[in-house]
Image (cartoon, rainbow, N blue to C red):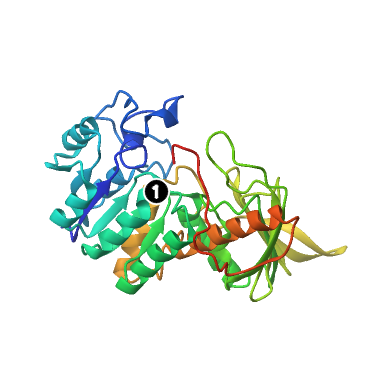
Amino acid sequence: MAQYRAAVIGLGWMGMLYDLAPRSPDRFNIDDVDRPTPPLNIHRKFYHHDHPGEEGLPTSYAEAIWNRPDVELVAGADRDKKRLQVFSERYNIQALYTDAEEMLRQEKPDIVAVCTNTKYRADLTCLAVECGAKGIVTEKPMAHTLAEADRMVQTCAEAGVPLCCGAITTTHPSFARARALVQSGAIGEIVSMEASGPGAQHQNWSYFLNSSPAWVSGIGDVPRRESGSDEFTGQGIMVTADGLVVHFRRGAPGVRLSGTEGEISFDYQPGWKLWKEVDTPDGKGRVEMPWPNPQFVTPYGGVYCLADVMDCLAGTLDEPKNSGRRVAVALEVEVALKQSSAKGGERIELPLPDRSLGLHYDWFR
């Protein structure tokens, strides 16, 4: 029997469309109300990925919520009435709104998925908490500015509301396995970490931090692109308060953790790999070891974000793997790297005093 009532704000790709239509080549031209919605199949089976075990799960938040017996999907909000109608037909829901605030105040859902464009996420997240939400998932990016991210994190923390900000690879259960291995000392003491970039839209590295970032140095950033994005494109380092050095390097995997007795790395293909230092006839050497299950397999959609929030509510998880707190850390590091690059690689101390700083994203975000 359902214990929680849930609602979705924004019925775009991550809100609903992923599980009703194949992603179109012109995929980003449908995320605004003034752009066409592709042909949708309300009877499409959501197990559309051919993977064993727990894979092949729903991608969108609507389908992920619908697929959980402990959550009842009760309402949806979108400016596009055509999408609302499809949502109603797919899930047999009559509580349809073109105004998200009206929906939150009227329905007071326990679980809220905020799948709007970035500029609305902070306000709607905080409003959802005000209206009694017990758990919140948002799409990525989390927010434009540090102040917005701060407000989201603080509002949710003060109310005890778990906040997961984006369906990224970090939400996959294999990341929890990797962190447990690191914490158990499987590769010894961590001496460094690297990633291809700070990626506040999709960061894997912040999940493995044990202390706050202290300073950064970056080079090679480029001006804002035609798409609207000015996300950091250079390279650099970040040093934490406990002395860990994180390298942001082009060509690096999604994340690599190097220890005194081994190494763990992740990339989309082949997933996780583990090397351990062992005794050989020629002395010590690093040998690749089998990766303990679960191994990473796509997809990594909203189902895992929701699962983390529900585990938090059940008391079996302290915070979502891609929590708002961790994403806010990555956002601040990325903004600081941009500042450093603009100043020729100058060391930038954290936290940044100016919380109005932030990032622009591609127009469709």
Name which residue type carries label 1: Lys
**Count of marks, rendered view:** 1
Q: Is residue 216 left or right of residue 179?
A: right
Task: Judge whether residue 65 can be spotted in this image.
Answer: yes
Label 1: element kind:
helix
Q: Is residue 19 left or right of residue 74?
A: right
Residue furthest bottom as drawn: 242
Q: Residue at x 38, y 63 (%)?
A: 152
Percent from the top left, x then y, of residue 109? 20, 57
Task: Judge whether residue 73 can be spotted in this image.
Answer: no
Q: Quadrant location of the N terminus? A: bottom left
Compared with residue 77, is residue 312 higher up or lower down, i.e. above or below? below
Percent from the top left, x then y, of residue 158? 33, 73
Q: Is residue 143 left or right of residue 197?
A: left
Compared with residue 60, is residue 184 higher up or lower down, i.e. above or below? below
Between 214 and 268, the one lying in front of the other is 214
Between 40 and 316, the one lying in front of the other is 40
Q: Residue at x 24, y 64 (%)?
A: 130
Q: Which residue is mark 1?
A: 119
Q: Quadrant location of the C terminus? A: top left
Q: Residues within 10 Å of mark 1 (few under 14, many from 20)?
A: some
Percent from the top left, x then y, of residue 215? 66, 68
Percent from the top left, x then y, of residue 210? 57, 72
Q: Residue at x 45, y 55 (%)?
A: 171
The answer to which quarter of the image holds residue 182 is bottom right
